[in-house]
Amino acid sequence: MKQTWRWFGPPDTISIDDISQAGVEGIVTALHHLPNGSVWTLDEIQRRRSEVAHYKNGEPSGLAWDVVESLPVSESIKQQTGDWKLHIENYLTSLTHLAEAGIYTVCYNFMPLLDWTRTDLSYKLGNGARCMRFDIIDFAAFDIHILKRQRAAQDYPAAIVEQANERFQAMDTVAQQSLEKNIVCGLPGAEEGFSLASLREHLALYDSISEDKLRQNFIDFLEQVVPTAEKLGIKLCCHPDDPPFSLLGLPRIMSTEAHYTTMMQSVDSYANGITLCSGSLGVRADVDLPAMMNRLGDRVHFVHLRNVTRESTGEKISFHEAAHLEGATDMVALIQAILDEESRRVAAGSSDTSIPFRPDHGQEILSDLRIAGQPGYPAIGRLKGLAELRGIATALSYKTS
Ligand code: DNO
């Protein structure tokens, strides 16, 4: 397992110098400053590669850009509107440039409008640490009373609607504004951010896009890009929906193991792979992550290791981000399943025997609490997560000589 770390590029307050001290072996980054749908030029890619490869003083860092997260799929492609064909051409050109620069693992998602979504970005835990939380009651209160989406109330069980009404009545303007901002502005790495008015306009565009239609658009996208990726030796890996259920009435089509199986069968190629995100999929009680890794592991090209505590039951639930070894996912069993897959690859003579993973998110602890960092991406919380995950992988791989 290759230990990687997400870096948001030069504006990131955690530098390559800092990251190198965390003992990581590779970097996950993206050209966040380029608009969705545009070409990633070779120049821009080379510049970022060089930034990754050097410390602030110009000395080599020994680190390389291993994984792209994400090469965004534009809304035009997802909806098949406007410039979508040009955006696909641009996607292919960007993949070609990435391969020319020696970068072969490319993560993306197919979530409509909203990327990962939380209602509370700084939820205080009993020990004073802070983490991100998704509260389905707050979310429903936003949807029904702030966004005022038509038919919103029909999308939640009656008990949730009732609690959302009470919750909203008790909120002052500051609480309402902060909830709205958390949901619509876009979290780190998210590709789109909205105002309330623009979110309403964008939601209307999905009125005629059913789940089946979105899936067909996804398959059309894969049919266009996977053959090129295959030729270039690029491994595409789709990130799951986070949270893994429909939000704001939008279709979500990458929330379960069955969704991944459909995706893999629709375009059957090694280049059409998975980002196994234990924090996103782990919200669902019906996803067994170690078993999924055992069943679909030969297409897992990138792993996000993170844990969640489920706070309620049902299809749409509340949850918060747990410490990496706590929460719903049996992290030891999942890491064992990843190591088993690597052993199968070694036996099969594959060259991809070290699957890149990153400690996904982290709780804010110690000095993180005194720094206004990127929500979900604190230095010390992630370092703790990485150290724990690294410890498990080391112990499970230990062989006495
Ligand atoms: C959140 C991230 C997501 C992810 C994208 C992948 O922390 O895991 O934003 O990067 O969904 O395309």
Image (cartoon, rainbow, N blue to C red):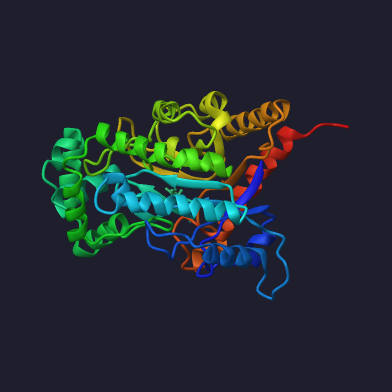
Q: Left or right: 337 with respect to 201?
A: right
**Residue lying farthest right?**
401
Q: Left or right: 171 with respect to 315?
A: left
Residue under the image location 63 percent in, 66 percent down? 50
Residue 96 point in image, percent of width and height: 52, 52
Please say if 396 is above or below 141. above
Can the viewer see residue 397?
yes
Residue under the image location 56 percent in, 44 percent down? 232
Can the viewer see residue 316?
no
Please say if 69 is above or below 329. below
Residue 36 point in image, percent of width and height: 37, 58
Query: In which quadrant is the N terminus drawn?
Result: top right
Residue under the image location 32 percent in, 49 percent down? 85
- How many marks the image carries: the answer is 0
Residue placed most toward the observer, 267 or 187: 267
Residue 400 point in image, percent of width and height: 85, 31
**Residue lying farthest left?**
150
Q: Left or right: 120 with respect to 386?
A: left
Residue placed most toward the observer, 167 or 11: 11
Residue 111 point in image, percent of width and height: 34, 44
Query: In which quadrant is the C terminus drawn?
Result: top right
